[in-house]
Image (tube, grey):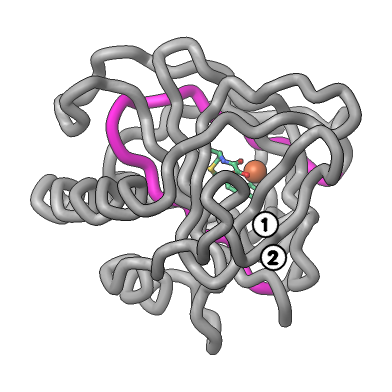
């Protein structure tokens, strides 16, 4: 029996085309202030295929020496991350059911061949508040399982404008991006996929 973890909500087409275009412009401004960079895994220094940046008071970063963590400054520019755009704060208010605003918005950029291996998000002190994900641009094949790496997984497509809310038991579910479907969206001029994840880091 294939079941999604409790608390997992996929809302296809949450953002219409106009709101997607407006959001892309806001993310372009974020990236102009806080450039995308290629993070590296702890210890091995192996680079991720996804490029990343953040907005918010805290951003998720990783490098060979210090590993996974949240910090208030961009690792390259050493300046504070730009603010989270108001449209994303509004979206969070609508779908997260949380009393406090998000502190971190991780911006993931996937080129055609980028992927993200199966992992859990557990670098946050606050594991009660949901994570909210927004997909923009090319579609991807997304996979979600249970709290154990060996639990069975369910795969489905995430398309531009879709939202996923990861609350309850799904908050600690293993998940990953197996592939991008190139040229499936006209939203981004140069193709690729952007994923935004809004999070509370501290309770
Ligand atoms: C399920 N991002 O940034 S978004 C990540 O498409 C991440 O870039 C993927 O995994 C991406 O950590 C997936 C959907 C998502 C985000 C957070 C989750 C699913 C999740 C946290 C817990 C369980
Ligand atoms: Fe994740």
Residue 130 is a magenta residue: yes
Residue 111 is a magenta residue: no
Q: Looking at the image, is mark 1 or mark 2 nearer the viewer?
A: 2
CB atoms at circles 1 and 2 under 8 Å apart? yes
| Numbered mark located on residue 168 in the image | 2
Residue sitting nearer the eye, 184 or 27: 27
- In the rendered image, is residue 177 in sight? yes
Q: Residue placed at 67% from the left, 36% from the top? A: 175
Residue sitting nearer the eye, 159 or 78: 78
| Numbered mark located on residue 6 in the image | 1
Q: Residue placed at 31% from the left, 25% from the top? A: 138
Relative to 169, is 138 above or below? above
Residue range corresponding to the magenta coloring:
129-147
Q: Residue placed at 50% from the left, 46% from the top? A: 53
Q: CA distance from mark 1 to mark 2?
A: 6 Å
Helix, strand or loop for the magenta stretch, by majority:
strand
Relative to 61, is 138 above or below? above
């Amino acid at each position: 029996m294939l079941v999604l973890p409790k608390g997992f909500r996929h809302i296809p087409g949450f953002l219409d085309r106009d709101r997607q275009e407006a959001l892309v412009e806001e993310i372009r401004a974020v990236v102009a202030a806080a450039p995308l960079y290629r993070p590296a895994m702890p210890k091995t220094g192996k680079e991720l295929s996804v490029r990343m940046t953040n907005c918010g008071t805290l951003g998720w970063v990783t490098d060979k020496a210090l590993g996974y963590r949240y910090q208030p400054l961009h690792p390259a520019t050493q300046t504070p991350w730009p603010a989270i755009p108001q449209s994303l704060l509004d979206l969070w208010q609508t779908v997260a059911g949380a009393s406090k605003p998000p502190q971190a918005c991780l911006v993931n950029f996937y080129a055609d061949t980028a992927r993200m291996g199966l992992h859990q998000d557990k670098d946050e002190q606050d594991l009660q508040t949901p994570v909210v994900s927004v997909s923009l641009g090319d579609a991807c094949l997304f996979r979600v399982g249970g709290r154990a790496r060996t639990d069975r997984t369910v795969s489905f497509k995430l398309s531009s404008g879709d939202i996923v809310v990861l609350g309850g038991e799904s908050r600690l579910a293993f998940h990953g991006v197996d592939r991008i479907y190139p040229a499936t969206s006209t939203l981004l001029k140069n193709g690729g996929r952007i994923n935004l994840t809004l999070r509370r880091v501290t309770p």
